[in-house]
Amino acid sequence: MWHDKVKIEKLNPGHERRILVVSDIHANLLYFEGALKKADYDPEQDELVIAGDFLEKGSDNLAVLEKIIAMAKEGHTHVLSGNCDTWAELFKWGAEADSRLLQYFRYRRSGLIWEMSRALGFDLMTTDELGPVKEKLFEAYPEHWRFLSDLPAVIESEHYIFAHSAVLPGKALEEHTGQEVMKTDRFYNLGYSFPKWVIVGHTPVCLYTEKLVCANPLIDRERKIISIDGGCVLKDDGQLNVLVIPFEGSEDFSWEYYDSFPEREVLDYQNENRDSYYIRWGDSEVEVLERGEEFSHCRHLRTGYEMDILTKYLFTGDKVTRCNDCTDYILPLRPGDTVSVVEECSNGYFVKHNGISGWYYGRLK
Ligand SMILES: [Mn+2]
């Protein structure tokens, strides 16, 4: 699956049906069902493309996988594999890989294999050997393994190419490897452009923005790239995006998103702050200048930028302190705006407005 040439599935939806695209559900059943509902997914009228990474990181692996298998069986749901969905490979690996995997499962204590093992009565914390567990897993879930190992890595229609992470320009689709289409990071930043629309997930879109934390899909009309991973499960303020294509060939893209934060109404005007910064995954080393119970005043090591960070977002390892993604951006808001509340703090709220995260220091209804 990783080093072989990719399997490509063709999609011919006709010109009357919507095409909805989700990616990176990451075993979050609530967000998956919420997103389908918000986009009004109807298999009678729509095609749904699930662009990989529906498994791992979240806690509903079996439930999400079984729902997707059932939907795919009904038709009008098309699934491709992401780098987190390749567990059928497990049965090709030998004993040496097994002991490393067992360590990994014990460290994560979640994921498809963890859940399946538990359902069969195995506790991976106390199992010495993965071999016998694998045998049982193989017997108990034949349909699951068949589904996962048969997944294409690319879905192609007349005007669009769907892949989990990337497509490489100037290379025939069928010449790509699984590794290339499933695990190329930061595709949107690589400067590629395409004659046909390429639609991917994999890299949460908020990692691409400079100043703002924005989880909405990125659409580059010149380069024909759309990146849709809203950071579901991975980010505290993440969301599951559904890209909506009105019909095959249309470029009139829109989107819906789902998150589970409570919605409230803004009562006061608030202006945006001129200077703000977004500390994000991969570049999140900070020095704690003053530790408080709720907030700590910190300096971002690489840039020297100082901001207050929720103390619960800080985690200190052996030498360095890092933090969850955070920002001191103050959102421009007006009375009547609807925001979803991610954090309720003593001095204000960390909220999202139209997919953009930031602080609000006024009153909420
Ligand atoms: Mn991925």
Image (cartoon, rainbow, N blue to C red):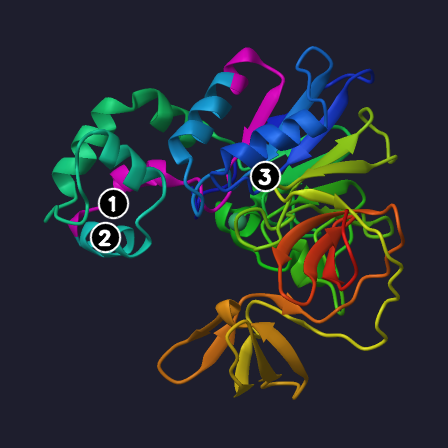
Q: Tell me which amino acid carries mark 2.
A: Ala
| Residue occupying image coordinates x 44% and y 83% | 320
Q: Which residue is mark 3?
A: 174
Q: Tell me which amino acid carries mark 1.
A: Trp
Residue 97 is labelled as: 2
Taking 213 as reference, is 80 left or right?
A: left
Kind of element beneath mark 3 = helix
Is residue 252 or residue 8 the one in the foreground? 252
Q: Quick check: marks 3 and 1 in contact, CB under 8 Å?
A: no
Q: Which residue is mark 1?
A: 93
Q: CA distance from mark 2 to mark 1?
A: 6 Å
* Location of residue 196 by image quarter: top right
Q: Quick check: marks 2 and 1 in contact, CB under 8 Å?
A: yes
Q: Position of residue 296 (x, y in %)?
A: 56, 79
Is residue 89 or residue 332 the one in the foreground? 332
Is residue 80 or residue 319 the one in the foreground? 319
Q: Position of residue 193 (x, y in %)?
A: 78, 53
Part of the protein shown in magenta: 71-95
Q: CA distance from mark 3 to mark 1?
A: 26 Å
